[in-house]
Amino acid sequence: MTSFDTTPQLNVWRALLTLAVVFVMLATSGWTALHNHRAPSPLQASRSAWERGSIAGHELPDTDSAPELLARFFGTLDARQRSDLAHRYPLAVGNMNGAPVTLRYAANRLALKHERTVERKRMHDNRLSSLGQYEAGRRMHRYEALLDEDRRILAFDPNGSGRAAEVFGDLDSASRVSVVVPGVDTDLLTFQRTYKQYSAPVGMADSLYRAERSAGPGIRTAVIAWADYTTPNGLGIDSATAMRAEDGAVRLNALVRALPGSSEVALYCHSYGSVLCGVAASSLPSRVSDIAVAGSPGMRAANAENLRTTARVWAMRDADDWIQDVPHLEVGGLGHGADPVSKGFGARVLSAEGAKGHAGYFEPGTESLRNFAEIGIGAYRAVSCARDDDACRTGLSAGASS
């Protein structure tokens, strides 16, 4: 997106904040009742089948059990039994925090193949409009792309606009893991792009992984493109509230707690994704060492201290990013609060030189991407601070230890 006059943007946000109360009330009353009568989604159906299933004469654990319990359960099974469960309940296993990551990859391949077949049939279903057939074709081609042999799909949900997560690198052996948390208008169809590829989660994560490998070739890293939450649709009501962020925060917390090993985790939260990270911050485990936000409308906190996290908090914003024109306020739960790059917020403000707007922070060759990569490998002294941020420079001179 490009820069635009501040006044229209202010008027839009004031209108959104005024209307949001009405829509929130509707969303929690009559509309919710309608949604409760819908047929179960494919993922829900798979989980329900799992709950009725068994292995070797024993009941299966609850799909919402703690990751540690599920990891122990899968550890009691042999390879054939694990494969059998993935074939019987691919979506349940593929989205199960605590299941071995390689088993999740295999299960999601099975689920993607099934959904590809479903959409291929819908492409030629005369009961659908031409637009419906076209949309089926788009989803079918997306599934084909996700089925490329070298891709590691950690989460996949075809329901609605869809959700997904993909891993770059070896998650099992990584000593440091980075998680890219995107913002509005992210779903299965926008999970990756050919045009402006680094504005989509797959391009962001791939770019960050390559940059980390270049910055620290001897460090075992992995990067997750995490679009496994329902994002707001454009600059509408949802983007002015924390409803999507609150649900996403629960999902992000579950992901981080289920990651294998004891790797440190850095979060890279773009745009509305920074709202989610702000909401999640206080509940995240101590293995989260860094939270870096870019192009943030706010983190639902008055300052970094109020995030109540032991993680280092970093922030950046390009000079041409239109998000600077969004009012940083919160009124009755509406709006997202203080500006993370302001001096009063207390984050370490990084240089974003070369980013060129709201969607350019992960572009190769930019100072923003280089800074992200140095954080990802723990090379804190190598990051470059914004010119006027003394707190950032002070932290670096102390080794960025706190």
Image (cartoon, rainbow, N blue to C red):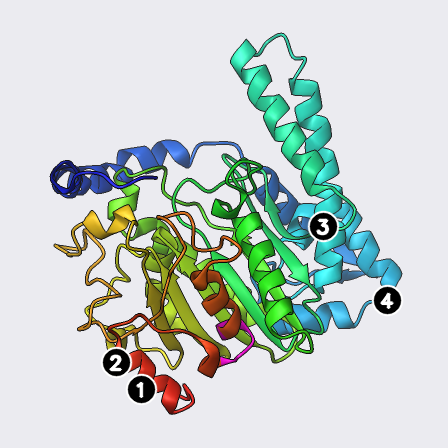
Q: Which residue is mark 2?
A: 390
* Residue 171 x %, y %: 67, 67
Q: In whole angstroms, how far apart are the C-alphas of marks 2 and 4?
A: 55 Å
Q: Is residue 294 magenta?
A: no
User: Measuring 41% from the left and 85% from the top, which residue is drawn there?
Assistant: 400
Q: Is residue 82 left or right of residue 143?
A: right
On the image, the x and y values in percent for residue 96 come to: 63, 58
Q: Are marks 3 and 2 in contact (CB under 8 Å)?
A: no
Query: Is residue 376 part of the magenta span, yes or no?
Result: yes
Q: Nearer the viewer, residue 230 or 295?
A: 295
Distance between the Cα atoms at labels 1 and 2?
6 Å
Q: Which three-letter amino acid code belongs to the residue tagged 1?
A: Thr
Among numbered discs 3 and 2, the one appearing first in the sequence? 3
Q: Position of residue 332 (x, y in %)?
A: 13, 55
Cα distance in 3D space between marks 3 and 2? 42 Å
Residue pointed to by mark 3: 151
Say whether marks 1 and 2 touch (CB < 8 Å): yes
**Label 3 SS:** loop
Please identify, in this view, whether the residue under mark 2 or under mark 4 is nearer the observer: 2
- What are the residue bounds of the magenta stretch? 375-379
Q: Nearer the viewer, mark 3 or mark 1?
A: 1
Q: Residues within 10 Å of mark 3 (few under 14, many from 20)?
A: some
